[in-house]
Amino acid sequence: VDFCFDEIETGQTVLEILSYRNHQEGSQLYESVDKYLHGCSPGIASPLLFINDHVVVIQDIIANIDDFISWAEQVNGAKTYLCFDQLQKSLLSSRSMYSTLEEFSTEVKHIQNLSSCDRLASKLQEVMYGSVCNSTPIGFLWCFLSTLLVSISGMVMITLRSSLYRARVYTNVPLRATWN
């Protein structure tokens, strides 16, 4: 209950828990959770900032490779025989690298879409606030009621045992005069 009240009032409880678990402010996990719980607004690509940084770097590399391929095709078209074989090998490798990076860029954009605020923030907030805060008191109530029911049933069984079974009388049992 303290977790839910404090988190709803200040919004800092989850971040304090992360700090306690040695995830300092500025770490990827800390920043991502903070963005998803408190800073997400619809339309943000992804609060996972390191993915956004990778997308920019990949796009720059793809642009540079594209520039190199267009330059190499111009030189190749001029039929320059100086290092012609090396240029052909570089051009082939560059085209292969270009297609691989294009596929990788598509996968990273797919990851970005999967981790977008529109998809993930509402689910994370529902788990943190909806499930934890709403279900915990109900769960405690059911645990208390079931424990109370078990204890009452046990007491009734012990109390009614004497009325359900006939008392036994043992007649031929010798009594000891002394107890050793």
Image (cartoon, grey):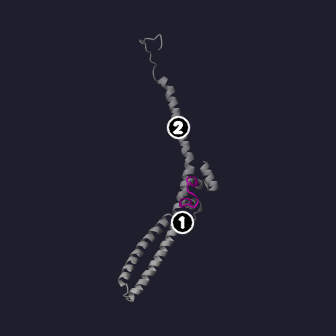
Q: Residues within 10 Å of mark 1 (few under 14, many from 20)?
A: some
Q: Quadrant of residue 42?
A: bottom right
SS at badge 1 = helix
Q: Amino acid at mark 1?
A: Leu
Marks 1 and 2, how far apart at CA: 48 Å
Between 125 and 146, which is closer to the camera in this rendering? 125
Q: Quick check: 116 left or right of 70?
A: right
Q: Residues within 10 Å of mark 2 (few under 14, many from 20)?
A: few
Residue labelled with disc 2: 147
Count of numbered tags = 2
- Please, is residue 100 above or below residue 162 in the view? below
Q: Which residue is painted at 58% across and 55% down in the image?
A: 19
Residue labelled with disc 1: 49
Q: Is residue 23 magenta?
A: yes
Between 148 and 66, which is closer to the camera in this rendering? 66
**Span of residues in magenta:** 18-30
State the residue lying farthest toward the left: 85
State the residue lying farthest toward the top: 177
Of the residues under marks 1 and 2, which one precedes in the sequence?
1
Q: Is residue 100 magenta?
A: no
